[in-house]
Image: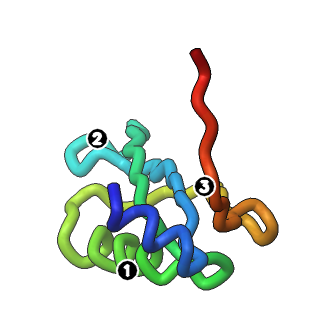
Amino acid sequence: MARETEKMLRGYGLTTAEMFYRMPDFRNVLNSFIWQEYDVAPDHPRLFRFIEFWQAEIEGPLHSVRFVHRREIAPGEWRNVRGEFYLN
């Protein structure tokens, strides 16, 4: 958990991609694969590295990829709070 929090503080956000690919033996059949990782927008280096891996190592050729990116912590949403209170 601490690792993910550190990434979010450095500007990473959760990227979710849905890859549509053709089945190796049945080229007219599309299948989908969901990939999710913390990545940095707008360049998305981890997503593009995964797509390059897919193209080099996976037999099913990619048809299309669609993705969304959500920064978990945006400017102004993270602040240091001093103090605490108890509910009885």
Q: Which mark is residue 86?
A: none
Query: Which residue is nearer to you in this view: 56 or 26?
Result: 56
Query: Is residue 69 in sight in this rendering?
Result: no
Q: Position of residue 21 (x, y in %)?
A: 40, 51
Q: In which quadrant is the N terminus drawn?
A: bottom left
Residue 72 left/right relative to 5: right
> Helix, strand or loop at disc 3?
strand
* Other residues around mark 3 within 10 Å, as few (<14) / some (14–19) / many (≥20): few
Q: Amino acid at mark 1?
A: Arg
Q: In which quadrant is the C terminus drawn?
A: top right
* Other residues around mark 2 within 10 Å, as few (<14) / some (14–19) / many (≥20): few
Instruction: Pick out the residue farthest to the right.
Output: 76
Q: Give the quarter of the image for residue 84.
A: top right
* Residue picked out by circle 1: 49
Q: Which mark is residue 26?
A: 2
> Helix, strand or loop at disc 1?
helix
Asked if the residues shown at circle 3 and circle 2 are in contact, with their CB atoms under 8 angstroms apart, the answer is no
